[in-house]
Image (cartoon, rainbow, N blue to C red):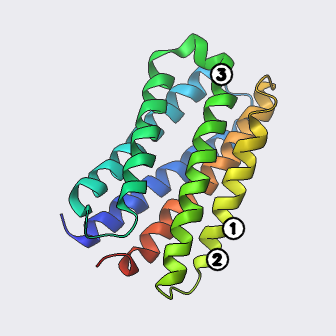
């Protein structure tokens, strides 16, 4: 697998996350069960892509361990969403809060690696990391929200995750050693 394929995989993950986010925004009345299934599939694909990129580029890309950690957490949460539908309906805001908090911290840390390398626009990844972390943190305080609010919140957050994945693809050429 070459660097171009890695970038394409990040872009695919980003586009899938953005599509899932737009779907949530356009259909706020969608049932939480269907939402958790679709989101679980998208999260599983996104996590697998991060793990594959780690496996191929470990030692050749800065912050590769963070990609592995993010990928493993994303896959575990996706499997939880897919195989525990009844519990997921009650715990989706909490699960997403944990995922967004960890992902936001990951993007935040990666942005400073980009800054060290002199990449222009690294601040956007910092801002996205902060937004994801803050929203993830605050979503842990009130896990019992109505379906409409969950759909809107999840839609916005998935779009932010998708933008962050695409930004990672755009700046990744600076990360390889």
User: Residue at the location (37% across, 70% down)?
Assistant: 62
Q: Is the residue 83 above or below the residue 76 in the image?
A: above
State left or right for residue 64 relative to residue 147: left
Whether the residues at callouts 3 and 1 have beta carbons within 8 Å, the answer is no
Answer few, some or many: residues within 10 Å of disc 3's Cα (few below 14, many 20 plus, some between 14 and 19).
Answer: some
Tell me the quadrant of the picture where the N terminus can be found.
bottom left
Q: Position of residue 144 (x, y in %)?
A: 79, 22
Disc 2: which residue: 123
- Quick check: marks 2 and 1 in contact, CB under 8 Å? yes
Q: Toward the viewer: 11 or 48? A: 48
Return the residue at label 3: 91
The residue that mark 1 highlights is: 127
For residue 41, which quarter of the picture?
top left
Residue 171 appears left or right of 62: right
Whether residue 140 is visible here, answered yes or no, is yes
In the rendered image, the residue lying farthest to the top is: 86
Q: Nearer the viewer, residue 78 or 156?
A: 78
Q: Residues within 10 Å of mark 2 (few under 14, many from 20)?
A: some
């Amino acid at each position: 697998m070459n660097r171009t394929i890695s970038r394409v995989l990040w872009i695919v993950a980003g586009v899938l996350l953005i599509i899932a986010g737009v779907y949530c925004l356009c259909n706020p009345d969608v049932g939480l069960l269907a939402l958790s299934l679709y989101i679980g599939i998208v999260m599983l694909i996104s996590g697998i892509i991060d793990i594959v990129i780690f496996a191929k580029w470990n030692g050749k890309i800065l912050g590769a361990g963070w990609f592995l950690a993010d990928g493993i957490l994303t896959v575990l949460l996706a499997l939880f969403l897919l195989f525990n539908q009844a519990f997921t309906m009650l715990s989706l805001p909490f699960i997403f809060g944990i995922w967004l908090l960890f992902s936001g911290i990951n993007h935040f840390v990666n942005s400073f690696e980009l800054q060290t390398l002199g990449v222009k626009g690294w601040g956007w990844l910092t801002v996205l990391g902060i937004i994801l972390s803050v929203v993830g943190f605050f979503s842990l305080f009130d896990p019992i929200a109505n379906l409409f609010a969950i759909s809107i919140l999840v839609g916005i957050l998935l779009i932010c995750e998708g933008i962050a994945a695409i930004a990672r693809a755009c700046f990744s050429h600076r990360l390889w050693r």
